[in-house]
Image (cartoon, grey):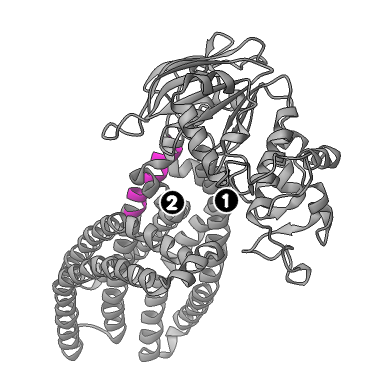
Amino acid sequence: MRIARIVGTCGGPYPYVLLLTSLVGGALSPVLVWAVKLLLESLTGDASAGSARTTAVVLIAVASAGGLFLPRVVVHAQAELNRAVERHMQKEIFGRLGRLDRLSDFESPGFLNRVNLAQRTAHAVPTQVVTGAFGSLQAVTAIAGFSAALFAVQPFILLAVLSVALLVAAVEVVTSRLATKAMRETMSAARRQAFYTMMLTNPTSMTDVMMLGTGGFWLRRLDGDLARSHAALAAVDRTTLRWQVPALVANAAVVAGAALWVTREVVAARLSVGDVTVVLSGIAGLTASFTTTAKTAGNAVKGFMLFDDYLAVVDIPARGAAKTLTRPAPLTHRISVSDLWFRYSEQSDWALRGVSFDLVPGTTTAIVGVNGSGKSTLVKLLCGLYAPARGTIRWDGSSIDGFDPEAYRDHIATVFQDFNTYDMTAAENIGIGDLSASFDRERVRLAAERAGVHTLVSSLPNSYDTFLSRAFLSGDQPQQEAAPVSLSGGQWQRLAIARAFMRDDRGLVVMDEPGSGMDAAAEAEMTDRLRWFAPGAAKVIVSHRMNSVRRADHIIVLKDGELVESGTHDTLMAADGEYRRLFVTQASGYLDAAGAAAVPAPGPAREGAAS
């Protein structure tokens, strides 16, 4: 069984500790009841019952001490086991997610719901199932002891108690299934609640919240989802209560009937006072043990159902598992894009339609077009982040579909317009661009200089070791915490570009709106820097500023997902097509009434021009 293997792999000695304590703990209660019976009967008997009295006292002392000591051992063992399993499960979940090679995997709400359930609950499921099994073992041991004691006094009472206890157990299992179903059904609402909470706490989103006065709006959304989630869970609780009440009433009736019977038998001198203890304690013990068994069985059912979500994540088959994937050699001739078609879903329109072009090492290709023309989609296909619906991308003649995705992407340096900002030091923010060289401070410094951000980083309170964040304090210990530092959008973008400059020996360089967070002068300066970066690579640059792409060796123009023009700036301007229209439309905003340029041409590259 998969759960048993996980617990056995990382649980150490603690599963065996729990097994031993379950067996011993289950026997303690029946032993205690029988010892009390012996003690009472020895007290009401003659003086020759001294040895029985001594035995009873010793058994009571041992059982009482065990009852106090064993629960503490169980709590410690369960905590240690849970921590070990949690670490293992988190590594398994996020290790598998880290090996997924398509962005589309992370764009499915159903899949993200399962990931969220797996993350929040699956790490506790193995310990929940295992400790539940041990708890059931302890309860079964107790049931066997109490049953033997009751059978010795009156078999019919045992039969009645067992019948009611089984009813209680069945109700517990069924209601556990209902609770698990409700948890799955409310997971989308739980994820939305996390989003609303982020909107009301994240510094970036709070700018809009404050300026637009949307705090109440997000709060109402949050409260609405909470109300719907709570209503679904409350409905399960009401159903559970409706089913539990008849079972509990039946149990009370059995206890009352047994009490009346045992009282009558004692009055008639057919049972001893010790027998009364056995009957009443046995009924209570059996009921409690069956309730424990029912709860642990219900938790096990719930655990197995939730474990399916964990398996759905970690057992996702790797793409290309049926074929041998290869590692690409360094690019030497060209990247060929042939008849590329792509759409984000079967219901959506085509984002790319039959796009074909070549990328040659040592040259820069610019991709231009209006918003929604397919520029960013195209570069993400080039990076292997999506798979085309039709067509191929070939790296020196070999389809990238046959490459190991991670090995292929190791040949690419990228900056995307939706770049990440990491809550780490400045050096780590840059060095993560090439993990193999992330601890090479000279490489990090050189990348920062090439991106024009070295002076800025050097001026930070702790230079390259300055922690950059608006969400966390730096330091692992409270006494080490220092106020973090944050950057402007343009400065963060320069760090992202420096991160790409760590990969200066790659065959393909993709820059998707690398200056989107900069002013026009800073973007022009950065474009110059990019021209000299990785001179032997095939470079692709996407920019909405036409002046930034005019010096590219080759320009392709996209419109409604189709490649409608390609060529150099001069040939495209002469063609009087879509490129010229875009260029003239944008340039008209920079001309004064007399037609003279109102903005000077970009000057020499200068460091730190971003705002």
SS under mark 2: helix
Q: Nearer the viewer, residue 489 or 402?
A: 489
What residue is disc 1 on? 87
From this view, report whether residue 433 is shown above or below residue 54: above
**In x, y percent, where is residue 436?**
74, 34
Q: Residue at x 52, y 79 (%)?
A: 61
* Residue 318 visible, this orientation: no
What residue is disc 2 on? 122
Quadrant (top left/top right/bottom left/bottom right) for the N terminus = top left
From this view, report whether residue 95 is shown above or below residue 510: below
The tag earlier along the polypeptide, 1 or 2, is: 1
Q: Residue at x 79, y 52 (%)?
A: 457
Segment tinted magenta in the rendering: 302-315
Instruction: Please indicate whether residue 31 sits to the left or right of residue 542 in the image.
Output: left
Q: Amino acid at mark 2?
A: Ala
Q: Nearer the viewer, residue 477 or 214?
A: 214
Quadrant (top left/top right/bottom left/bottom right) for the C terminus = bottom right
Q: Amino acid at mark 1?
A: Arg
**In x, y percent, where is residue 182?**
27, 59
Q: CA distance from mark 1 to mark 2?
A: 11 Å
